Image (cartoon, grey):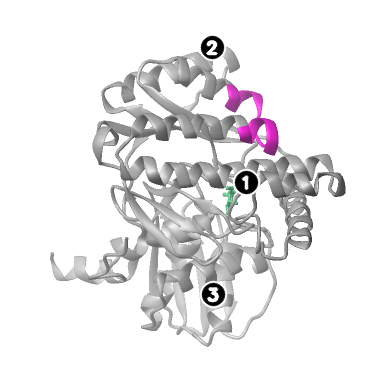
Amino acid sequence: MTSSQTASSRNQITAPARVNLLGEHTDYTGGFVLPIAIPFQTRATIQPGASRQYRFRSDQFPGERILTLDDREGRENLWSDYPVGVLRELQKIGISPPPFTLELTGNVPFGAGLSSSASIEVASCLAILRLARETLTPQQVAQLCQRAENIYVQSPCGIMDQFVIASGRANHALMLNTRDLTYQCLPMNRGTLDDTCIVVCNSMVKHSVAAGEYGTRRLESEQAQAAICAAHPAIRDLGDATIGMLNTVADRISANAYKRAHHIITENGRVLQAKDAMEHGDAQTLGELMTAAHASERDDFECSCDEIDFLVETALELPGCLGARLTGGGFGGCTVNLVSRDHSQSLAAALRRQYLDRWGIEAQTYVCEAVDGAMRSNGFLEGDHHG
Ligand code: GLA
């Protein structure tokens, strides 16, 4: 490394995107998720500023957002709300960075369900921490970035995206218990899993219901959770609940609340089975669980759409596909496919071709493997060997 490279890497942070293998819509009722970090990048470059200002720029959007050091203005419905929200949360815990210019670049597709927002939050958070010469644990970083999104951006997301983008580990999926934030890194290269890779397919559609429906689904799930907890005092959240318990409250909750909880409870069970399958290097079973998860998302959680169902059904007919499902919040976005490595490129090409024929839309496909999260890849976790 030359000295100028050393200087630039010191003030530059990269954060990946994420794709979730299993455990969808389980992260706001104490359940399990199984995401991986994937090799897209948000790059945050931070430079000390001369004036008493914080400046935010992005190569994706025009203009610059400028705040003074003691500015407390609210959100502006701009991309910069994400890093500004992070700055606010850092200030709330007593971290007051010196003036800076933060510039964001990168290639994470926006609005595709691959967590461009959490990638921006984590990259910004780590860049500001480095400038301020402060450190936080991976859990604190994930929770702080989630609060930035919940409180400042006012988007009611769970903790999954921020957590895996901060703490993911190369060649592993991160199984996170979202109740207590304990996690385990499960190998993606054991047994028959070693012959597989992940193919992400971006449908390029995002139905406009997506934003509002996330909140509605969350409220319906919480309604079922409250009813179960009231009837069964030992139960802390849906993470503990069984279908038998859900059935005891069926006549006290709406039909939708029942279906949402049915998805969540069965989905938590699938993540636990997937853990077992991964520990045994059993790609076949992991794939079957992913495909079963899709049926549950489509029929019980009702967060799929025709384009996504088409991509899942088409993939499952193609050689080499072991499992396919909708990933992320839903109503469009991406599918995630577990595919034998030998077939990954041909499957991706066939999927794009058939999708174009049916919908007239050019899907994008990404063949990927799990990469390190931002705290590992930027040296915040040196010597850490969790899981
Ligand atoms: C979005 C949210 C996550 C999670 C998923 C659904 O990606 O940001 O917290 O709830 O939807 O699993």
Q: Which residues are magenta?
A: 296-309
Q: Residues within 10 Å of mark 2 (few under 14, many from 20)?
A: few
Q: Earlier in the sequence, mark 1 or mark 2?
A: 1
Q: Identify residue for label 3.
A: 87
Residue 20 in view (yes/no): no
Which amino acid lies under the numbered mark 2 shown in the image of this protein?
Asp
Q: Is residue 382 magenta?
A: no
Q: Residues within 10 Å of mark 3 (few under 14, many from 20)?
A: many
Residue 97 in view (yes/no): yes
Q: Identify residue for label 2.
A: 357
Disc 3 vs disc 1: Cβ atoms closer than 8 Å?
A: no
Magenta part mainly helix, strand or loop? helix
Residue 233 sits in quarter: bottom right
Where residue 337 appears, as percent x and y from the top left, is 43, 31
As drawn, 351 above or below 271: above
Q: Secondary structure at mark 3?
A: helix
Q: CA distance from mark 2 to mark 3?
A: 46 Å
Q: Secondary structure at mark 2?
A: helix
Quarter of the image with the C terminus is bottom left
